[in-house]
Image (cartoon, rainbow, N blue to C red):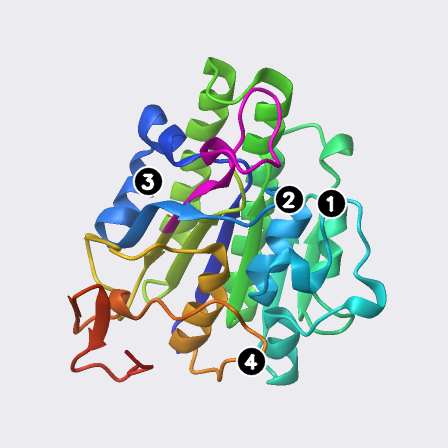
Amino acid sequence: MAAHVLIVLEGVRPDALVESGCTNIHSLMHGGSYALQARTVFPSLSLPSHMSLIHSIPPIEHLVVDDEADPGVNRKTGFLDLLGMSRRKAGFFYSQESLRYLSRPGALAFSYYQNQDHFDGEVDVELVSRAIIWMERENPDLVLLDLNQADEAGHQHGWMTPEYLHVVRNLDRTIGVLMDRIPQDSRIFLVGSHGGHGFHHGTKLPEDVNIPWIACGPGIRRAYQISRQVSIMDTIPTLAAFMDLDPEPQWRGSVITEIFEGSRVESGHSIIRSSSHAVGA
């Protein structure tokens, strides 16, 4: 079975990928399917968007509406929990402590947290390096990587400033290292958590809610621009379909069927043709 890598780009706007000339990320787009005007949820903040990503439900249902919230008794069963229950091996590499709420204790086979405030270096590089070592040793079903330095640059220097775009270019180089080291049959899903404007994010402005969304690997259409509106909540249902996992009843996102090889799009709907992953029309 192919390995799966889910990369979350914190604070990376779609136009930043264009402006920065991110060659590695653009090669993922050329080799896979993509949407450069996908949307995150409101409020367009880190923890609410991650909860909606992993649980495929909006903030009004998971009740996490700021970056300090503790889901507590409202905690839902998320994709990482589902992987644990199905005895799939998953690892999580991150630098925001609040993201520990994305899974229940014991669901992950491995997690690595690096406090970026106490790290003298590029924390995204550290996380990717650790993830590569773990993947090569453990051959997991899923690796979840949360890369946060672009978001930090946006808050410190402003979104779309030269300093911010420099960090985005460094992020692209880091992703290139990962692409060179992971198994050839891996599937990569790359999704933004939110964008930003000025020195902030969290609003309904396009600069905050528009995000990149890319999927690349075996069984995924190449050089294909997705025709439908993509939501961050569609990520997990689509990933689960590729991993042959049944969808959870509470998921609000849907499978992006048109990215499957052998599919064709008619009248705005995706029809699966000649695919072992015929998950619906």
Disc 3 + disc 4, Cβ < 8 Å = no
N-terminal of the two: label 2 or label 3? 3
Q: Is residue 169 left or right of residue 249?
A: left
Q: Identify the residue under disc 3.
A: 24
Q: Identify which residue is drawn at 26% across, 84% down.
A: 276
**Which of labels 2 and 3 is toward the front?**
2
Q: Identify the residue under disc 2.
A: 46
Is 104 placed above or below 19 here? below
Question: 7 or 192: which is nearer to us?
Answer: 192
Q: Identify which residue is drawn at 58% across, 48% down.
A: 146
Few, some or many C-alpha atoms within 10 Å of disc 4 (few <14, some 14-19, many ≥20)? Answer: some
Marks 3/4: CA–CA distance: 33 Å
Q: Label 4 is placed on what type of residue?
A: Glu
Disc 1 + disc 4, Cβ < 8 Å = no
N-terminal of the two: label 4 or label 2? 2
**Which of labels 3 and 4 is toward the front?**
4
Observer able to see residue 182: no
Question: What number is the disc on residue 66?
Answer: 1
Question: 59 or 75: which is nearer to us?
Answer: 59
N-terminal of the two: label 3 or label 4? 3
Marks 2/3: CA–CA distance: 24 Å
Q: Label 3 is placed on what type of residue?
A: Asn
Q: Identify which residue is drawn at 54% across, 38% down.
A: 204
Residue 201 horizontal/vertical position (percent): 60, 32
Over which residues does the magenta segment extend?
A: 195-213
Q: Label 2 is placed on what type of residue?
A: Ser
Question: What number is the disc on residue 248?
Answer: 4
